[in-house]
Every structure is written in structure tokens, then in C-alpha cells.
């Protein structure tokens, strides 16, 4: 009996390893799909989105989700296609280009045109599948033009309800970033036009 147990255990272990190796890996991006209409370069506002920051708790290759209360899970089979900080930066840059409309000059010379600097410090990036996607952060806009540059610092808390599933959760974060871009764009447009700008209401 013992003589036959070892081959059975080895076979079971091999089957388990094969099952783990064949488990599907899913990758996600926060970048929105390509828009059919690009901003008019002549009418666009040059901006520079500075490096963003995300909470250390979620700065992982895997999706980090809440399971209720203080419990969280690191999902090995559900991953970001790029570091989360790069995903947030890229998605926000695309959304800002559409909302302003504008173009991200990324530190390049602006040929004398006004340049907006945008910064974002995310304090929370919460994910609960089938419930919500939440962004909470501080951000600022600074107009670098002329002898009296204008600036404004604000904060936003955006919560999007999401359907079950990880794809729906990522789409919720996409919607939240798009809403954030809209809030930033309103402030940026006011500063660029020389009008009084105010932070979005909570």
C-alpha cells in the first residue's frame, strides 16, 4: 500500500502544478479607447502632467481589492498591463487632452504658448468588485505664462458604482479618472482665460 502511495502523490502534485500553470492571467489598462476625433492642434492648450503618485498599498502589479471591512486581497490572476502609477498618468493625460482640449507637451518647449502644469497625488485608490471604484486625491493646476502665473490647489473624491467583475471595476476607475479630468479642465480653462477659478464642490 505504501509502495503505491508515493507514485500517487507525485501524480497528484504534477496535476496540481499543471492546473496552476494553466490558470488564465488577465491584464487590464486604465487607458481609454482611441477617440475618433483628435483635438485641433491650433486650438489646443499645451499642458504638462507631472509624475503622479498612488498609495503604496495598491502600487502592485496585481489588482488589490477590498473584501469588506479591513480585509484586502491581492489578485494574482488579475494584473495591470503596466505599473499602476503609469496607468493613472497615461489615462489622465489622454482624458485631459480631450477635455481641455489640449496636448501633453511633456516638458518640451511650447513655442511661447501658455503651458499648464498639472499635478496629482492620489491618497486613495479603492476597489471593491460589484460595489464601487473610488479615487481620492489632491491636485493642482498652475498656468506658466507671463509675469504673474496663476495657480489653484484642490482635492476631489470620486466614487463610481460598478457591476460585478474585474473588467467592470477597471471601467469604474476609468470613469472616475475621466470625471477628475473634467474637473481639472474646468479650473485650467478658467485660469487660461484669466477668470476666477474655484475648486469643485464636494
Image (cartoon, rainbow, N blue to C red):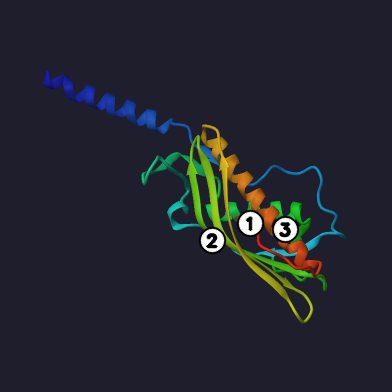
Q: Seen in the image, is 38 located left or right of residue 187?
A: right
Looking at the image, tell me whether mark 2 or mark 3 is earlier in sequence order: 2
The residue lying at 57 percent from left, 36 percent from top is: 168
Which secondary structure, mark 3?
A: helix
Which secondary structure, mark 2?
A: loop
* Frontmost residue, 53 versus 157: 157
Q: Residues within 10 Å of mark 2 (few under 14, many from 20)?
A: some
**Residue 22 position in % (x across, y down):** 43, 30
Looking at the image, tell me whether mark 1 or mark 2 is earlier in sequence order: 2
Q: Are marks 2 and 3 in contact (CB under 8 Å)?
A: no
The residue lying at 73 percent from left, 63 percent from top is: 188
Q: Residue furthest right?
A: 42
- Residue at numbered disc 3: 185
* Frontmost residue, 181 versus 155: 155
Q: CA distance from mark 1 to mark 3?
A: 15 Å
- Residue at numbered disc 2: 53
- Residue at numbered disc 1: 201
Q: Is residue 126 above or below residue 156?
A: above
Return the mark for residue 9: none
**Residue 166 position in % (x across, y down):** 52, 36
Quarter of the view holding residue 41 = bottom right
Amino acid at each position: 500500500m505504501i509502495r503505491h502511495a508515493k507514485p500517487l502523490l507525485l501524480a497528484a502534485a504534477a496535476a496540481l502544478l499543471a492546473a496552476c500553470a494553466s490558470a488564465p492571467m488577465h491584464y487590464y489598462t486604465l487607458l481609454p479607447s482611441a477617440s475618433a476625433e483628435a483635438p485641433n492642434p491650433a486650438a489646443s492648450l499645451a499642458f504638462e502632467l507631472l509624475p503622479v503618485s498612488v498609495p503604496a498599498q495598491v502600487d502592485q502589479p496585481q489588482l488589490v481589492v477590498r473584501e469588506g471591512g479591513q480585509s484586502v486581497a491581492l489578485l494574482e490572476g488579475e494584473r495591470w498591463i503596466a505599473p499602476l502609477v503609469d496607468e493613472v498618468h497615461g489615462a489622465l493625460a489622454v482624458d485631459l487632452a480631450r477635455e481641455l482640449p489640449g496636448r501633453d507637451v511633456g516638458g518640451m518647449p511650447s513655442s511661447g504658448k501658455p503651458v499648464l502644469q498639472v499635478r496629482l497625488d492620489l491618497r486613495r485608490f479603492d476597489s471593491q468588485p460589484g460595489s464601487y471604484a473610488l479615487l481620492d486625491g489632491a491636485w493642482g493646476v498652475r498656468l506658466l505664462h507671463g509675469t504673474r502665473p496663476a495657480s489653484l490647489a484642490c482635492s476631489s473624491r470620486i466614487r463610481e458604482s460598478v457591476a460585478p467583475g474585474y473588467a467592470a471595476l477597471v471601467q469604474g476607475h476609468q470613469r472616475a479618472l475621466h470625471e477628475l479630468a473634467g474637473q481639472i479642465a474646468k479650473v485650467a480653462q478658467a485660469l487660461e482665460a484669466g477668470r476666477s477659478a474655484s475648486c469643485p464642490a464636494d
